[in-house]
Structures are given as structure tokens and as C-alpha cells.
Image (tube, grey):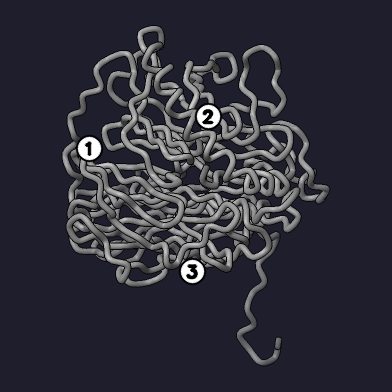
């Protein structure tokens, strides 16, 4: 049934042991399920249509400019293209992929300008357990293995063979986001999720640089195993399905990618809203700063028809055509239960409900470029979710071919006398045609002000320094260039600045 996330290392062993038995069961059950769904279609608001059957499918997406060209990811390392009823191998990296434990080829993300560049990105694990975020370039309807290259340095994951995360998504501003698990095992014994210097247990942000390795930014932390996350295609909100350990499954939320910057979702100090297994004093020190989930559910059946299970499968906010009253609701499921459920973002707990569908071996959802949603069973079938109205799709126009953009930042001094103003300089490249473009300074999630680029494409800010503060600058998308976000720069307040000695006498 593929290798979706487990809730502990013990559970992962059990899943692997039963995999062969359950695969036979789900293949038999899938046929029965389709018959039941067909006979009950008139009584349900949400039904399914099978689009194909595959070998351990684990993810689905589409061509950004053609929603009918579907790309199905198989865990063993293949990407299959389903176009006009014809199925062909689009890419095959099985030679470098390891499927030990929860590893494999876990997802792909096609560049927004895929129709022009042919670039797409892959998240996979190798035989050493390392996590790779790589790029390939397609030519026509295939991508040769020779084009495969890492876009960031491989992320070591040496201890366990579970909790890899594995989702790639392009954010609304054009950056690539990557989820990583906490390294596996029990209780996050290596304390990865709360360590800002480590890349495990995080949401990372990457700006891929053609021909060179990029440095990922730790965007959010405190995640156990964010196997699936997504952006609301209407509002840009971020929703993360984070797999719990023994008590709670949770959905984490940020109103935008910018608001997710620096967000700490609590693991392993917390599991959902419950105390987590960590005993580190850092948990007590950070109490009150953790971002609580907007929704959580228990592992034990509450007996009221409410959500329960063992490992959440995060989905998408329904924004596609024909979804009826499902429009604007977040769809999700659970590995053990298979029920497709949904809730409203305005009142998650009060509005949570089952949608009357069960997918055996559910291990992922997918979304095409029209917004239509799909459910993937690790046992083989892939289904399109059909709402009560027509879901005919008008393809969106292809995005403009914008050039990459870079914004740098520097503090003239990293220490400033308390209550005085620091001096921050930012500059943007390429510079040609950028004069007058707005650059915004941020302190965490707070917007401090906007300046416009001068003739050499630089700006200056003078924020007041009352406490230790980190700053970042952003430049918006223009007619020619993609948006960009700088790295962080931190300025510390001091009571009194020491003057440098200018003569030999005072040295």
C-alpha cells in the first residue's frame, strides 16, 4: 500500500510487515468499493471517478498550463504521464531511489513555467536514507535521467527509515517549499524539530538556482512528519497535515507563506494541544510562543462519528469547479481509516464531517491546475473527486516567463545602542529596469515600511532597536521579474557601544 507516514517506529514496522497482505486485500476491496460508490452516487454530494491504476502511487499533480495532463508519482521512482487516455513513462529515477521503510520518490512539483522551461522538482530518498530535493528537465513528453541534479545539498537522515516528510509545493510567490520529518524513531530523540540549525522536522523554503546548489531557509519548525501540506489556491493560506505519535493528529495553519516564517508548531514539546514527550527546559522557556493547530483529532474512536485514526493524510482546500457546498472546505483523510472528511476554515472543530467516501489504502491527495482534487490509494487506484455540479475546466493561461530575482540585505552594525536606530541596506539584482520598485522591510511577521529602489537598485531602512530583532526584506513580482525574499539579519541592542581606540596610548 505504498509507504505513507507511520505514527511511530513500531507502527512503521507493523505497516511494513503487513504490506503484502494488505495490498491483496485493498485490490479486492477497491473493486467492491467502486460498485458501492456507483450505486450510491445519487445519495452523496461527493463521488469518485477512477482515472487509472498504478504500482504504489503516492502523489499526483498536473501540467500548470494543461490540467488534463496528469503526472502520477510511483513510490519506486517512476513518474507516469496520463494524457488523453494514453499512459506513458515521463521520468524514471528508480536507479537512485531507495524504498526502505517510508522512503521512495515521495512527490514532485512542476515549475510554474513548466510549459516553457520543462523544469520540475522531485523529493526522494537514497539508500543511505538521505533526503534529496532534485531537479529534472523535460524534453517533450519525457525527462532523461541525465538531467537529474540536486538543487540543495542532500539532507542526512541516517538513524531511522521513517519520518521523511516528502511534500514539494510551489508557494503563491513562486518559491519552492519542502517538508521534512523529524528524523524518525520515538519522541524525536535527536531533538531535530526544535533545533533551528537542523533541517529535519521543518518546512523549508528554497529558491532554486540554475546550475548551482541553493541554501534552503528554515521557514517553519516544530513538525513531526509533515507528509503532506498545501496552499489554498484562492487565499494563499498554508495548511499542514502533521502526523502525530500516539495521541493526536493535527492540521497546522498560516494565513500566508509570509506568516509561516518562523512559526513553531510545537513538536516535540507538544503533540497537538497535549504535552509532548520532550523534557528539555527549552519547552518551558518557549511556552506561549508555539502556534497551536487549527484542528486535531484523537487516535481512539470518540464514538460520536468524529474523526479518529493513526496518521493524518493532509489534503487541499476545495476550490475547483463543481464542488457545491464543499467549496472553501479543507479535505483530508487518515491512513488507517480511509474516510474522506472536511471542515470549514472558519470553524474547524464544529464543522468537521465525513463526506461518505472511503478510499482503501489512502496515502495522498492531489490537485490539478484547474483545482480539481484527487485521492490516491497506495494499493493502485487513483480517483478524481466529483462534486454535485459540473466540473468542466477552463485552463488558466500560461504564466509569463519571468526572470529570477535576488534581494540581498546587510546591517551596517549588528549591535546598536538600545532605543537608537540601526541602518539596514538592501539591494536587488538584476538591476536593469528595477528603479522605483518597492522593497518592504519585515520584523518577523510585522511590516515596518516600504522604500523604493534608487538608480543603483538599493534602499536603506533605519528601524528603531528596542530589543533583539531579526529583519528580512522582500520585493514583489514585477512585469519582468519573480518576487524575492532576503535572508534574515539580526541586530542586538546594547546599553553602551564601545568606542574603537584610535591611538596606541589607549590600546
Between marks 2 and 3 in the image, the one whose residue lies nearer the viewer: 2
Q: With respect to residue 275, does 489 lie above or below?
A: below
Q: With respect to residue 379, does 104 lie above or below?
A: below
Query: According to the image, label 3 marks what residue?
Result: 153
Q: Earlier in the sequence, mark 1 or mark 3?
A: 1
| Disc 3 secondary structure class | loop
Between marks 1 and 3 in the image, the one whose residue lies nearer the viewer: 1
The x and y percentages for residue 292 are 64, 33
Image quadrant in which you'd find residue 426: bottom left
Q: With respect to residue 52, does 348 lie above or below?
A: above
Q: Earlier in the sequence, mark 2 or mark 3?
A: 3
In the rendered image, is residue 278 in sight?
Answer: yes
Image quadrant in which you'd find residue 407: bottom left
Query: According to the image, label 1 marks what residue?
Result: 68
| Disc 1 secondary structure class | strand
Query: According to the image, label 2 marks what residue?
Result: 333
* Distance CA(mark 2)–CA(mark 1): 24 Å
Q: Is residue 60 left or right of residue 331?
A: left
Q: Residues within 10 Å of mark 2 (few under 14, many from 20)?
A: many
Near-viewer residue (273 or 84): 84
Q: Residues within 10 Å of mark 1 (few under 14, many from 20)?
A: some
The x and y percentages for residue 101 are 60, 54
* Distance CA(mark 2)–CA(mark 3): 32 Å
The x and y percentages for residue 327 are 37, 19
**Residue at the spot 43% in from the left edge and 55% down from the top edge:** 461
Q: Quick check: marks 1 and 3 in contact, CB under 8 Å?
A: no
**Residue at the spot 76% in from the left edge and 40% down from the top edge:** 276
Near-viewer residue (370 or 76): 76
| Disc 2 secondary structure class | strand
Near-viewer residue (66 or 81): 81
Amino acid at each position: 500500500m505504498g509507504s505513507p507516514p507511520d505514527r511511530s517506529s513500531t507502527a512503521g514496522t507493523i505497516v511494513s510487515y503487513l504490506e503484502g497482505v494488505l495490498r491483496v486485500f485493498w485490490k479486492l476491496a477497491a473493486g467492491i468499493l467502486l460498485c458501492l460508490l456507483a450505486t450510491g452516487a445519487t445519495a452523496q454530494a461527493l463521488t469518485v471517478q477512477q482515472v487509472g491504476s498504478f504500482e504504489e502511487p503516492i502523489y499526483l499533480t498536473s501540467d500548470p498550463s494543461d490540467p488534463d495532463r496528469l503526472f502520477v508519482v510511483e513510490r519506486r521512482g517512476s513518474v507516469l504521464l496520463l494524457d488523453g487516455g494514453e499512459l506513458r513513462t515521463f521520468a524514471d529515477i528508480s536507479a537512485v531511489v531507495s524504498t526502505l521503510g517510508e522512503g521512495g520518490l515521495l512527490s514532485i512539483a512542476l515549475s510554474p513555467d513548466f510549459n516553457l522551461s520543462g523544469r520540475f522538482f522531485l523529493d526522494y530518498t537514497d539508500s543511505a536514507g538521505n533526503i534529496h530535493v532534485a531537479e529534472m528537465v523535460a524534453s517533450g513528453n519525457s525527462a532523461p535521467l541525465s538531467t537529474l541534479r540536486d538543487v540543495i545539498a542532500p539532507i542526512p537522515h541516517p538513524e531511522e527509515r521513517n519520518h521523511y516528510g516528502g511534500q514539494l509545493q510551489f508557494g503563491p510567490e513562486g518559491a519552492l517549499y519542502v517538508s521534512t520529518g523529524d528524523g524518525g524513531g520515538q519522541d524525536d530523540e535527536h531533538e531535530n524539530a526544535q533545533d533551528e540549525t537542523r533541517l529535519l522536522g521543518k518546512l523549508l523554503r528554497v529558491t532554486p538556482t540554475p546550475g548551482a546548489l541553493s541554501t534552503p531557509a528554515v521557514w517553519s519548525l516544530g513538525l513531526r512528519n509533515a507528509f503532506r501540506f498545501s496552499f489554498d489556491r484562492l487565499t494563499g493560506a498554508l495548511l499542514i497535515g502533521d502526523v502525530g505519535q500516539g495521541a493526536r493528529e493535527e492540521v497546522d495553519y498560516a494565513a500566508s507563506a509570509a506568516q509561516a516564517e518562523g512559526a513553531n508548531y510545537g513538536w516535540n514539546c507538544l503533540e497537538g494541544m497535549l504535552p509532548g514527550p520532550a523534557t528539555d527546559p527549552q519547552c518551558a522557556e518557549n511556552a506561549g510562543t508555539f502556534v497551536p493547530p487549527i484542528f486535531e483529532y484523537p487516535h481512539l474512536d470518540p464514538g460520536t462519528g468524529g474523526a479518529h485514526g493513526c496518521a493524518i493524510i493532509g489534503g487541499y482546500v476545495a476550490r475547483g469547479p463543481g464542488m457545491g457546498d464543499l467549496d472553501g472546505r479543507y479535505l483530508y483523510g487518515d491512513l488507517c481509516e480511509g474516510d474522506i472528511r472536511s471542515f470549514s476554515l472558519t470553524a474547524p472543530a464544529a464543522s468537521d464531517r465525513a463526506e461518505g467516501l472511503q478510499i482503501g489504502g489512502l496515502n495522498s491527495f492531489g490537485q490539478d491546475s484547474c483545482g480539481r482534487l484527487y485521492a490516491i490509494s497506495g494499493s493502485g487506484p487513483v480517483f478524481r473527486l466529483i462534486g454535485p455540479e459540473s466540473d468542466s475546466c477552463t485552463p488558466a493561461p500560461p504564466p509569463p516567463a519571468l526572470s529570477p530575482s535576488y534581494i540581498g540585505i546587510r546591517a551596517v552594525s549588528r549591535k546598536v545602542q538600545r532605543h537608537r536606530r540601526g541602518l539596514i541596506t538592501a539591494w536587488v539584482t538584476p538591476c536593469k529596469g528595477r528603479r522605483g520598485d518597492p522593497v518592504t522591510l519585515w520584523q518577523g511577521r510585522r511590516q515596518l515600511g516600504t522604500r523604493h529602489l534608487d538608480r543603483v537598485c538599493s534602499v536603506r531602512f533605519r528601524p528603531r532597536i528596542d530589543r533583539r530583532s531579526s529583519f528580512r526584506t522582500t520585493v514583489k513580482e514585477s512585469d519582468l521579474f519573480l518576487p524575492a525574499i532576503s535572508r534574515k539579519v539580526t541586530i542586538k541592542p546594547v546599553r553602551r557601544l564601545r568606542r574603537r581606540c584610535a591611538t596606541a596610548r589607549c590600546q
